[in-house]
């Protein structure tokens, strides 16, 4: 299994091939459904763009089992005080 950081279309091309493209697309579909739900919650709660930031990359694990093993970029808490 190999982990791929996906930020651009080129990253998708480099991470996939004819044998694993179906795995990638199934995993991407699953994560996109989650992002759409998150956006729906943002709109329903009236959150600003500062309070809801869309992911800028994802790590995709090519496990060949159609498991969604995707890690979205982590966004540090704003105004964290110590």
Image (spheres, grey):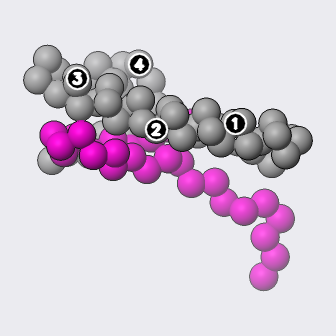
Residue for badge 4: 9
Q: Is residue 16 visible?
A: no
Q: Could you say which disc has been placed on residue 31 in the image? A: 2
Instruction: State how far apart marks 4 and 2 are (Cα).
Output: 16 Å
Instruction: State how far apart marks 4 and 1 are (Cα).
Output: 22 Å
Residue for badge 3: 21
Which is more toward the observer, 4 or 65? 65
Instruction: State how far apart marks 3 and 4 are (Cα).
Output: 13 Å
Identified at 56% across, 54% down, the residue is: 74
In the figure, is residue 53 to the left or right of 48? left
Secondary structure under tag 4 reads: helix
Query: Is residue 6 positioned above or below 76 on the image?
Result: above
The percent position of residue 41, horizontal first and vertical second, equals: 74, 43
Query: Is residue 25 positioned above or below 45 on the image?
Result: above
Closer to the observer: label 4 or label 2? 2
- Extent of the magenta region: 56-82
The percent position of residue 38, horizontal first and vertical second, equals: 65, 42
Identified at 81% across, 36% down, the residue is: 43
User: Looking at the image, do the residues carrying marks 4 and 2 touch, with CB atoms under 8 Å apart?
Assistant: no
Instruction: State how far apart marks 3 and 2 are (Cα).
Output: 15 Å
Residue for badge 1: 39
- In which quarter of the view is residue 8 placed? top left
């Amino acid at each position: 299994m190999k982990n791929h950081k996906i930020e651009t279309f080129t990253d998708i091309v480099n991470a996939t091939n004819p044998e694993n493209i179906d795995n990638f697309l199934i995993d991407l579909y699953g994560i996109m459904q989650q992002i759409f739900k998150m956006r729906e919650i943002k709109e329903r709660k009236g959150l600003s763009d500062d309070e809801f930031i869309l992911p800028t990359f994802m790590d995709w694990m090519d496990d060949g089992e159609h498991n969604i093993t995707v890690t979205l970029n982590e966004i540090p808490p704003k105004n964290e005080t110590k």
